[in-house]
Image (cartoon, rainbow, N blue to C red):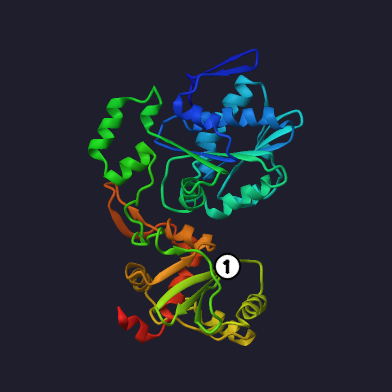
C-alpha cells in the first residue's frame, strides 16, 4: 500500500502535492484522461484522489472504480481505495456489495473480467486502473462509457501499456489525432521522486528494449509475441466507404453458444485486396436467429461463400444449413496454418480493415503468444479462447479461392 508521500489529511480535508505527471492529469479538462506511464510511477495511488475530486464536483450518486482482474482488485485497488476513503476520510466499506459509501454517494468497485458488474449502474465518473492489460477488453471500456452516458461523466485511466489493442486505438490514437475528448499523459517511472534511478538504469541495461520502453517509460511499442505484428494500422486501417454491391464477399464464422463471431470480407476484384467491412460478436441467440440476421445483411450483397467452425463442428454447420446458410468447413484444420494465411495477407498489404470495426482491430493489437522468463515468445497463444473475431477471420480468409492464394 502506498503511503501517499504527496498527500496530507487534516480534519478529513485533503491537501496534495502531486509530481508533474500527476499535475498534468489534474489539469486536464478532457472528458477521458489517461495516465499511460511506467511502473511504480504514482498511477494507482493517484486514482482515489482524482475520483474524490470528481465526487466533490458532481455531488451524490454512483461512481465506478474498476481494474483489470479480480486478483488486481483484491491486491491493489481495494487496499488503495479503503486506505484513502475509509481510513483517511471515514467512509464505510460494504464488503457484500463491494461498495464504499458515504451517505447517498456510492463507489462501486469492480473488475473488468466480470463485465456484468460494469453494466449494473449509471455513474457520474469512473477510475479505471490497469486498463491497458489484455484482460481489460474493449467490451469493458464500452460498458463503462454506457454507464456514464446520462451524466456525460469523466474517466481517469491509469495503466502501463501492455499491447496495441483498444487503449492505443480508442484513446492514444484519438488524442494524437487531435480529439479534444481525450488526453494522454505519459511519463517514466522516475517521475515518481521515490523511484530509484539505479533501478531504472538496471532495468534499461537488462530488459529487452520493447519491454523497458513499455514498462518503465510508458511508451507503446510492439511487444514480443504479438502474432500479427506486421499489421500496420497507419496503412491498413481505412475509412469506411460504400462497397460496390457486385464485389465478392466472404463471411467467416466462429460458432459459440455465448459468443458467435462473424467477420465480413469484401474483395476488390481490380486491386485483388480484401477489406474487413463488418463484424459482430453476439450471444443469447438461436442458430435460426443468427442465420436470419446474417441473411438480412447479405440480401443486397454478393456473398459467394460462408465458412466457419473447426473441423469437428459438423453439427453446427448442419444446423446453419438447415436454417438457410451452407457453411463450408475450413480448408486447413491446423490453427497455426490458418494464422500463417492471415499473416501472408497482412505482410503483402492485401488485407485492410474498416475503421469502424473496432473489435477486430482491438484483437489484432492484443493477440499474442506467451513469453518465457527471458521475454522470448513461446508457441502457446495467450488466452486463445477469447479471440472469437480472429478465429472467424481465419475461417473467412481460408474461404478465398485457391487461385487468390497462389498469387502470393
Residue 319, image x, y percentages? 60, 82
Residue 95, image x, y percentages? 66, 35
Residue pushed farthest right?
104
- The answer to whether residue 65 shows anywhere in this view is no
Quarter residue 191 falls in: top left
Q: Residues within 10 Å of mark 1 (few under 14, many from 20)?
A: some
- The answer to whether residue 188 shows anywhere in this view is yes
Quarter residue 350 falls in: bottom left
Residue pushed farthest top?
10
Q: In the image, is residue 155 above or below residue 397?
A: above
Tell me the quadrant of the picture where the C terminus can be found: bottom left
Residue 397, image x, y percentages? 42, 76
Q: Which residue is disc 1 drawn over?
A: 280
Residue 149, image x, y percentages? 69, 47
Q: Residue at x 33, y 25 (%)?
A: 196
Judging depth in this view, the residue of 395 and 37 nearest the camera is: 37
Q: Residue at x 47, y 60 (%)?
A: 361
Amino acid at each position: 500500500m502506498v503511503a501517499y508521500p504527496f498527500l496530507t489529511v487534516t480534519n478529513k480535508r485533503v491537501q496534495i502535492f502531486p509530481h508533474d505527471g500527476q499535475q498534468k492529469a489534474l489539469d486536464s479538462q478532457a472528458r477521458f484522461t489517461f495516465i499511460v506511464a511506467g511502473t511504480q510511477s504514482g498511477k494507482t495511488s493517484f486514482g482515489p484522489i482524482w475520483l474524490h475530486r470528481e465526487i466533490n464536483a458532481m455531488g451524490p450518486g454512483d461512481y465506478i472504480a474498476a481494474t483489470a482482474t479480480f486478483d488486481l482488485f483484491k491486491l491493489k485497488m481495494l487496499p488503495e481505495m479503503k486506505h484513502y476513503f475509509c481510513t483517511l476520510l471515514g467512509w464505510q466499506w460494504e464488503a457484500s456489495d463491494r461498495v464504499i459509501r458515504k451517505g447517498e454517494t456510492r463507489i462501486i468497485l469492480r473488475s473488468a473480467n466480470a463485465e456484468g458488474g460494469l453494466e449494473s449502474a449509471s455513474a457520474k465518473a469512473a477510475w479505471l486502473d490497469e486498463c491497458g492489460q489484455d484482460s481489460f477488453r474493449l467490451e469493458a471500456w464500452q460498458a463503462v462509457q454506457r454507464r456514464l452516458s446520462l451524466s456525460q461523466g469523466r474517466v481517469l485511466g491509469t495503466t502501463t501499456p501492455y499491447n496495441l489493442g483498444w487503449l492505443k486505438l480508442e484513446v492514444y490514437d484519438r488524442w494524437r489525432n487531435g480529439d479534444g475528448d481525450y488526453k494522454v499523459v505519459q511519463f517514466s517511472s522516475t517521475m515518481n521522486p521515490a523511484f530509484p534511478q539505479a533501478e531504472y538504469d538496471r532495468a534499461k541495461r537488462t530488459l529487452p528494449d520493447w519491454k523497458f520502453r513499455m514498462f518503465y517509460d510508458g511508451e507503446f511499442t510492439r511487444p514480443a509475441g504479438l502474432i500479427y505484428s506486421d499489421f500496420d494500422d497507419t496503412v491498413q486501417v481505412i475509412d469506411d466507404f460504400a462497397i460496390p454491391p457486385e464485389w465478392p464477399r466472404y463471411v467467416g464464422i466462429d460458432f459459440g453458444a455465448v459468443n458467435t463471431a462473424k467477420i465480413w470480407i469484401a474483395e476488390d476484384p481490380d486491386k485483388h485486396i480484401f477489406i474487413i467491412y463488418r463484424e459482430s460478436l453476439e450471444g443469447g441467440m438461436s442458430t435460426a436467429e443468427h442465420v436470419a440476421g446474417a441473411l438480412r445483411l447479405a440480401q443486397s450483397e454478393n456473398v459467394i461463400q460462408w465458412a466457419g467452425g473447426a473441423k469437428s463442428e459438423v453439427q453446427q454447420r448442419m444446423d446453419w444449413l438447415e436454417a438457410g446458410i451452407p457453411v463450408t468447413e475450413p480448408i486447413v484444420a491446423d490453427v497455426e496454418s490458418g494464422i500463417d494465411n492471415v499473416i501472408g495477407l497482412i505482410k503483402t498489404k492485401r488485407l485492410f480493415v474498416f475503421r469502424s470495426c473496432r473489435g477486430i482491430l482491438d484483437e489484432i493489437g492484443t493477440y499474442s503468444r506467451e513469453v518465457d522468463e527471458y521475454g522470448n515468445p513461446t508457441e502457446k497463444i495467450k488466452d486463445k479462447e477469447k479471440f472469437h473475431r480472429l478465429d472467424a477471420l481465419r475461417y473467412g480468409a481460408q474461404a478465398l479461392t485457391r487461385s487468390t492464394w497462389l498469387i502470393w
